[in-house]
C-alpha cells in the first residue's frame, strides 16, 4: 500500500498524502540518535572542498545540502531519489545552493558513468529497496578508485521492545518488518561488494534514552496507520 508508512517509501509518488512521508522524515531526523549518525557518516566520507559526492535516496535534500557546504568551494553534490515528489520538494528547499543538484533516479540503475564520484552516501534507504545488493554495486561502480561509500541502515529483525503492552509491542515490531528488506543494516557487508582492497567499517549504534519521546511519536503515527486511523 502506497500510504503505509513502512512499505510506502517504495512508492511515494503513488501515495495520496505526500506530507505524511515528508513529516515522518522530518520527525525522525530530529532524533539526537540519527543526528549523531548523520554527523558520523559525513565525517566518514572525508569530503572537503572540491570533492564530488553522490547522495542516494536524498528525500527532502537536507543531508545533501549539508554535504554541499562541506565540499564548497569547487565541489559538487548530486542527490538522487526514486520519488519525483521528493526531488521536487528537495529542489524547493535547497535549489539555490551552489554545486547541489537533485535528480530522479533508480538506485539500482544509476545514470552515471563509472568512476564519477569521490564519495557516495546512502542513509536508511537500502531497507526500502527490494534488491539492496544491486544498489550497493551501482554505487561502487560510479565511485572512483579509492573513493568512499558510506551506508547506514536499520536491522529491524533484531529490534527488541521491552513493554508490558504485548499488543502494542507486536504492532511496532510488525511495522519495522513491513519494509522491503528488514535486515538491510545487517546485510550491507553482503551487498555483493567483495573487491580487492575494499575496507569495510561496521559501525553499530544503540538507541539512546533521550531519543525515546520522539521515537514514541513516530511509533504512535505508525500504529495509527496500521490500525487504519
Image (cartoon, rainbow, N blue to C red):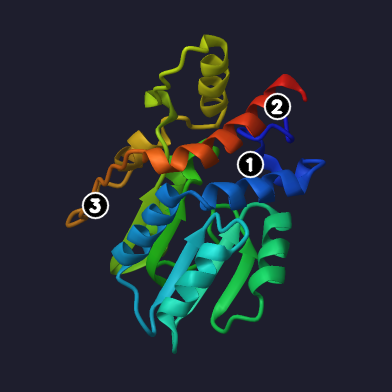
Q: Earlier in the sequence, mark 2 or mark 3?
A: 3
> Badge 3: how crowded within 10 Å, few (<14), some, or many (20+)?
few
Counting from the top left corner in percent of width and height, residue 177 is at 51, 25
Q: Is residue 226 left or right of residue 107?
A: right
Q: Earlier in the sequence, mark 1 or mark 2?
A: 1
Considering depth in this image, is 193 or 15 the residue closer to the camera? 15
Up/down of 166 relative to 67, above or below: above
Q: Quadrant of the C terminus?
A: top right
**Element on which disc 3 rests:** loop
Q: Which mark is residue 195?
A: 3
Considering depth in this image, is 211 or 52 the residue closer to the camera? 211
Q: Earlier in the sequence, mark 3 or mark 1?
A: 1
Q: Is residue 97 left or right of residue 211?
A: right
Q: Which residue is mark 1?
A: 9
Q: Which residue is mark 2?
A: 224
Q: Is residue 121 left or right of residue 85?
A: left
In space, the residues marked 1 and 2 are separated at their CA atoms by 17 Å
In space, the residues marked 2 and 3 are separated at their CA atoms by 44 Å
Counting from the top left corner in percent of width and height, residue 17 is at 79, 43
Which numbered mark, 3 or 1, is in the foreground of this view? 1
In space, the residues marked 3 and 1 are separated at their CA atoms by 30 Å
Q: Which mark is residue 52?
A: none
Residue lying at 35% horizontally and 56% vertically, measured from the top left? 150
Q: Looking at the image, can residue 108 be seen?
A: no
Q: Quadrant of residue 196?
A: bottom left
Which numbered mark, 2 or 3, is in the foreground of this view? 2
Amino acid at each position: 500500500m502506497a500510504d503505509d508508512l513502512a512499505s510506502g517509501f517504495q512508492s511515494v509518488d503513488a501515495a495520496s498524502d505526500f506530507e505524511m512521508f515528508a513529516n515522518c522524515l522530518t520527525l525522525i531526523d530530529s532524533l539526537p540518535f540519527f543526528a549523531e549518525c548523520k554527523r558520523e557518516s559525513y565525517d566518514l566520507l572525508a569530503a572537503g572542498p572540491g570533492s564530488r559526492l553522490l547522495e542516494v535516496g536524498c528525500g527532502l535534500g537536507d543531508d545533501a545540502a549539508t554535504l554541499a557546504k562541506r565540499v564548497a568551494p569547487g565541489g559538487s553534490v548530486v542527490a538522487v531519489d526514486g520519488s519525483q515528489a521528493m526531488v521536487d520538494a528537495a529542489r524547493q528547499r535547497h535549489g539555490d545552493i551552489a554545486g547541489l543538484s537533485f535528480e530522479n533516479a533508480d538506485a539500482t540503475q544509476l545514470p552515471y558513468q563509472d568512476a564519477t564520484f569521490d564519495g557516495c552516501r546512502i542513509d536508511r534507504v537500502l531497507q526500502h529497496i527490494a534488491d539492496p545488493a544491486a544498489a550497493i554495486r551501482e554505487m561502487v561502480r560510479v565511485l572512483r578508485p579509492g573513493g568512499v561509500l558510506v551506508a547506514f541502515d536499520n536491522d529491524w529483525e533484531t529490534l527488541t521492545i521491552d513493554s508490558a503492552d504485548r499488543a502494542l509491542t507486536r504492532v511496532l515490531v510488525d511495522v519495522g518488518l513491513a519494509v522491503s528488506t528488514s535486515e538491510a543494516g545487517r546485510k550491507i557487508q553482503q551487498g555483493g561488494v567483495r573487491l580487492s582492497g575494499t575496507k569495510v567499517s561496521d559501525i553499530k549504534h544503540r538507541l539512546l534514552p533521550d531519543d525515546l519521546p520522539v521515537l514514541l511519536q513516530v511509533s504512535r503515527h505508525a500504529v495509527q496507520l496500521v490500525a487504519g486511523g
